Image (spheres, rainbow, N blue to C red):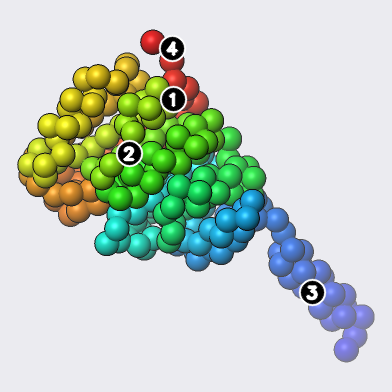
Amino acid sequence: MNTKSTTQLLVLLFALITVSVAPASDLRAGNGEPIQTRIEGHEVTGLLWANGSGGGVVLSHGAVYDAASWTAQAKQMAAVGLTVLALDEVSADTINAAGRYLKQKWHEDTVSLIGASAGGATALEAVAKSPSLWSQLILLSPAGGNLQSAADELPILVVASEDEGLSDNLREAAKLSFGTDDELFIVPGSAHAQAIFKTKSADTVMKKILARLGRRDQAKESE
């Protein structure tokens, strides 16, 4: 092998080594890349979309769903520059660990939390434990949790269907506790939580969610 070939080989090897050891913040992940990590003693597993640095989003699925169930929505969020982590395990402690992961490892200044059904209930629990971690909360048909307490801490968007059985209770809760930063959005039909994305209201709901996520520097205003 001549000197020129040797030099080219060394340059190629150096480039490969440099890429392999680059920090996560320098390597934006592809579509739905599986991740597994530990943050402050909690294991975080799920799927990561990280095509920009426009803020972080943690997705907490409903009881009969999984991380992959958010794929269509996560792709739309990533397309506008958000770093999106859809979780496998959606306990409150895991949700908060995921928020810290996006801040510590991906250097996202603001992280929003989206929870659906049972994952909405644990999202509310996560906010109760660490309200300062989150910039805002978006809920799809939350199956429990203290909505009023969360509304005191964060801007909230709640989405539900008119005929699914939650709308009256959510209207009452919104009347009692929602401020100018908060919104209850009721859509036609009876679809529950993530099933709303399979209805004719899917595009409207997604546009509203993306509009909320675009407000990066939200803070709860004093009422």
Q: Please report the residue visible at 35 percent of the width from the left and 58 percent of the height from the top.
A: 71
**Camera-nearest label, 3 or 1:** 1
**Camera-nearest label, 3 or 2:** 2
Pointer 4: what residue? 222
Label of residue 145 in the image: 2
> Label 4, label 3: how many angstroms apart (C-alpha)?
56 Å
**Camera-nearest label, 1 or 2:** 2
> Mark 3: which amino acid?
Leu
Q: Point out the residue furthest to the bottom here.
A: 1
First in sequence: mark 3 or mark 2?
A: 3
In the rendering, at what x and y percent does residue 148 appear?
33, 26
> Label 3, label 2: how many angstroms apart (C-alpha)?
53 Å
In the rendering, at what x and y percent does residue 103 appear?
60, 42
Mark 3–mark 2 CB contact (< 8 Å): no
Mark 2, secondary structure of its residue:
loop
First in sequence: mark 1 or mark 2?
A: 2
In the rendering, at what x and y percent does residue 104 appear?
64, 45
First in sequence: mark 4 or mark 1?
A: 1
User: Can you tell which quarter of the image residue 138 is in?
Assistant: top left
The answer to whether 207 appears left or right of 26 in the picture is left
**Camera-nearest label, 2 or 4:** 2
**Camera-nearest label, 4 or 3:** 4
Mark 2–mark 4 CB contact (< 8 Å): no
Relative height, residue 76 to residue 220 (above, below): below
> Label 3, label 1: how many angstroms apart (C-alpha)?
51 Å
> Mark 1: which amino acid?
Glu
Mark 1, secondary structure of its residue:
helix
Q: Please report the residue visible at 19 percent of the width from the left and 39 percent of the height from the top.
A: 160
